[in-house]
Amino acid sequence: MSAGRREGPQVDLPACTKLQLRRFSTHHFRLLFCPNVLSIEWQELGSPAFDEACLKRLHDFLCNRSHLQNLIIKISWSMGLDSLFQFVFCDAREQGQGLWQDIRSVEVWGKPRDPSIADGHESGLMVRNQQQYEKWWKNFAVTRDDRDLIVKAYM
């Protein structure tokens, strides 16, 4: 068994460099073996809350992608996003030599489950922590369109 592989059923994608996961649960990340992926676009399945267990599964999957260059996450805003932002915009760059040494861009697109909170918590969260996140990226922007809060960081 090669390094980084897990026991049990898996989908082996050793030649895959671009992975698009639509309406994909974090429970299924453990089934994927794609050591050479450079670009990931993940859209959540639509779980009721992005809790610590979801974040841990996403974190574990992304931590094994040392050559990742581009990451796009599309998620419904819910509780627990502080940790997601901290990981993708700060911790993954800060750890040691940088967990993602080849990263070029990260985008998180969020759609509020409840439109009444669209301009509340998540916008405030990004503004409050923006300086912390900006220090790891050449370009960092928080924007809104009609339906989404969009956070983009580029090297």
Image (cartoon, rainbow, N blue to C red):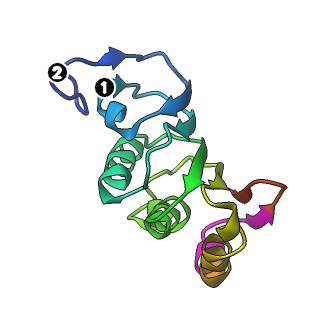
Marks 1/2 in contact by CB < 8 Å: the verdict is: yes
| Residues in magenta, as a range | 132-143
> Can you give x and y, in whole percent of width and height, for residue 149 in the image?
72, 60
Where residue 136 sits: x, y (%)?
60, 69
Task: Specify whether 12 is left or right of 39.
Answer: left
CA gap, disc 1 and disc 2: 8 Å
Residue 138 occupies quadrant: bottom right
Local secondary structure at mark 2: loop
Can you say which quadrant of the picture contains the C terminus?
bottom right
Instruction: Say which residue label 2 marks.
Output: 8
65 and 150: which one is in front? 150
Query: Could you say which disc has been placed on residue 148 in the image?
Result: none
Residue 4 horizontal/vertical position (percent): 25, 33
**Which residue type carries mark 1?**
Leu
Q: Earlier in the sequence, mark 1 or mark 2?
A: 2
Task: Identify the element where label 1 is drawn.
Answer: helix
Where in the figure is residue 76, as x and y percent of width and height? Answer: 58, 51
Q: Residue at x 64, y 54 (%)?
A: 110
Q: Is residue 149 left or right of residue 8?
A: right
